[in-house]
Amino acid sequence: MSLSLVRQGGAEAIAVFVNQSDEYYEQLIPRLNGIYFPGGSSNKISSPYAETAKKIYKYGLITFSTLNHCNDVVASYT
C-alpha cells in the first residue's frame, strides 16, 4: 500500500518523526486514527525506525485500551 493510495482513500497523512521523546509520541498517538508503516531496507529490530515503531505500538495500545469504551480503534498498516 502506498501513501498515494492512503490519500486517495480520504486519509490525511502527517509525518511521524523518529528519535523523538516519549512525550512526543504520547501526545501524538491519541490524535491519530491509524498509522502506516512503510517498508524499506532498514533493520527491523534495532534501527531508529524500529525503536520508533515500538513506541508507537506501545502508546497505540495504551490509547486503544483507554478509548475502548468509545469503540475507537487505532489501526496499524504495514
Image: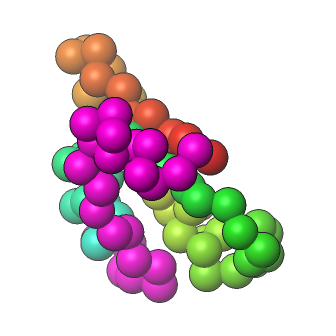
Residue at figure coordinates x 59%, y 59% from the top left: 38
In percent of width and height, residue 72 lies at: 29, 23
Taking the image as shown, residue 41 lies to the left or right of residue 23, namely: right
In percent of width and height, residue 37 lies at: 56, 55
Residue at figure coordinates x 33%, y 40% from the top left: 8
In percent of width and height, residue 26 lies at: 30, 60
- The residue range painted magenta reads 1-23
The verdict on residue 16 being magenta is yes
Q: Can residue 69 be seen in this snapshot?
A: yes
What is the basis of the colouring in this image? rainbow
Q: Can residue 58 be seen in this snapshot?
A: no
Q: Is residue 16 above or below residue 47?
A: above
Residue at figure coordinates x 37%, y 69% from the top left: 16
Residue at figure coordinates x 28%, y 62% from the top left: 14
Taking the image as shown, residue 29 lies to the left or right of residue 50, namely: left
Q: In this orientation, which residue lies closer to the viewer: 48 or 37?
A: 37
Taking the image as shown, residue 51 lies to the left or right of residue 34, namely: right
The verdict on residue 6 being magenta is yes
Hey, which quadrant is residue 17 in on the image? Answer: bottom left
Q: In this orientation, which residue lies closer to the viewer: 38 or 67?
A: 38
Main SS category, magenta section: loop
Q: Is residue 44 above or below residue 43?
A: above
In percent of width and height, residue 1 lies at: 58, 44
Q: How many numbered discs sit on the rendered protein? A: 0
Q: Is residue 39 above or below residue 67?
A: below
